[in-house]
Image: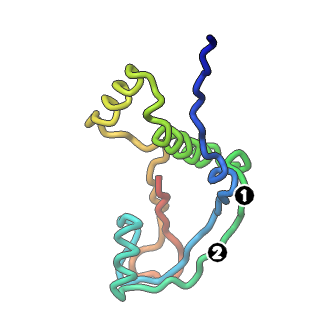
Amino acid sequence: MSETLKVPQTDQSHEQSEKYFSFQIKGWANFDPVNETLAKVAEGIEQGNGFLTLIEVLRVEDEVASIEDEEVRECFENLLAARRLIQNVNELPAKVKEELRAALQTKEEIVPKKTVMMVPGPSANEESGSRFKRWP
């Protein structure tokens, strides 16, 4: 009697129907957002300390492979792979599960690939000019 190989079913319909948006946000705040996390900036705006004036979609891609920024594409690919792994974790060999658990329990700090870059801008007294922070 022959055995049937059990192949885990992966739900790729979600991956195929997902769109990827490149966007930029502009706004005003009565606090300096440059050294704040995105969450803190959003919290400040929600508390009435600022306003969004523009959310602009620059590009829309139907698949991860179409994203030109290699680091962004790799981040999305890693997220998709992690989601597939989570869906199929029970199908993994015991050794791989152990390695995965060990990796998740590691308390090493992960250094982001993109570092925050401060762009010199005008002094606090100058009204025009731009300063920005690039999030990792």
| Pointer 2 local density, CA inside 10 Å: few below 14, some 14–19, many at least 20 | few
Q: Residues within 10 Å of mark 1 (few under 14, many from 20)?
A: some
Q: Is residue 95 left or right of residue 52?
A: left
Residue 64 image point, x, y percent: 67, 48
Residue 108, compared with residue 20, is above or below; it is above
Q: In the rendered view, how is the structure colored?
A: rainbow
Q: Position of residue 85 (x, y in %)?
A: 49, 37
Instruction: Say which element carries label 2.
Output: strand
Circle 1/circle 2 CB separation < 8 Å: no
The span from disc 1 to disc 2 (Cα, nearest Å) is 15 Å
Instruction: State the residue position of label 2.
Output: 56
Who's the residue at 39% across and 41% down the image?
A: 111
Residue occupied by mark 1: 61
Dividing the picture into quadrants, the one containing residue 124 is bottom left
Q: Secondary structure at mark 1?
A: strand
Amino acid at pointer 1 = Glu
Q: Residue at x 64, y 50 (%)?
A: 15
> Quadrant location of the N terminus?
top right
- Count the numbered circles shown: 2
The x and y percentages for residue 73 are: 62, 46
- Tell me the kind of residue under disc 2: Glu
